[in-house]
Image (cartoon, grey):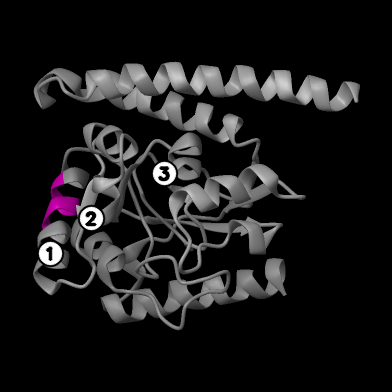
Amino acid sequence: MFYYTLRIAKMTALWADLLILTIVLYLLSWLPEAWLGRPYYRMFRVWCKAFVRALDVDLKLHQKNLNPVPRQYILIANHPSAFEDIGIPALFEVYSLAKIEVKKWWIVGRISAAAGTLYVKRESKESRRQVAQQLVGELMQGKNIALYPEGGCKGKRIFESFRYGAFDVSMQTGVPVLPVFLHYEAQEDFEWREPHTLIDKLFHFLNTKNNTANYYVFDAIDPAQFDSKEEFTDYAWNLYKQWQKKYLE
């Protein structure tokens, strides 16, 4: 009984902290974009960390890389859950690429947009072309970006292929790709499946019997070693298949 009382008190405090940060960030998001910049982005990362704590997820970073993480990189990851939207920026200083629908999410969408999140209409070839140009521009400004080469939440196992976008941009700019493999130990609870809503998933995260989320960082991949984006893409996809076999099977 004491344990549950203590947990309720702890979670109440964490959610109060998240609520205060959410209100502050939401109100600030109405300011002109030129007034926000890096300070708002830093607050956004603090908000992501607070969101992780409020969901009571035990987010673990596993550094499997043998070499230091480069100063600038394009982070790629598999995408089984909605949790990555806060889990990745909670751990990494990156500007994320998300589906355009995220921008319309109530409150959360406005905060993520003000923090510099980029958006793509996945089914539109023209939108994907335009966002690729945006990504190049962001990298030329020295930023790190994060995206999911599966092209969306495809389930708890690696999708049958990766899209070329991240690898094409890497080869154009020379910025290495930093692969991160995501493993939620309670896969059924964290996996995003139709017809789940965001509220459904928040409920699942809070009520899971195993709240451990493992984020494995591996060595960055230099685009100079590949002759084409297709070769680069296939190489990365095969790495993820190997990690899937090691950690999920």
Residue type of the residue flagged with mark 2: Ile
Whichever of labels 2 and 1 marks the residue nearer the N terminus, that label is: 2
Specify the quadrant that holds the C terminus: bottom right
Residue located 46% across and 67% down the image = 195
Residue 154 shows up from this direction: yes
Q: Main secondary structure of the magenta part?
A: helix
Q: Residue furthest right?
A: 1
What is the distance, in whole Å, between disc 2 and disc 1 at their CAs? 10 Å
Verify whether residue 142 appears in magenta: no
Q: Is residue 147 above or below residue 162?
A: above
Residue, disc 3:
70
Task: Report the front residue among 11 and 157.
Answer: 11
Residue 139 position in % (x across, y down): 21, 46
Please report the bounds of the magenta region as a residue range: 133-137
What is the distance, in whole Å, between disc 1 and disc 3 at their CAs? 29 Å
Q: Residues within 10 Å of mark 3 (few under 14, many from 20)?
A: few
Which disc is residue 127 wearing? 1
Task: Report the front residue among 46 and 51.
Answer: 51
Which disc is residue 100 wearing? 2
Where residue 123 sits, quadrant-wise, is bottom left
Q: Nearer the viewer, mark 3 or mark 2?
A: 2
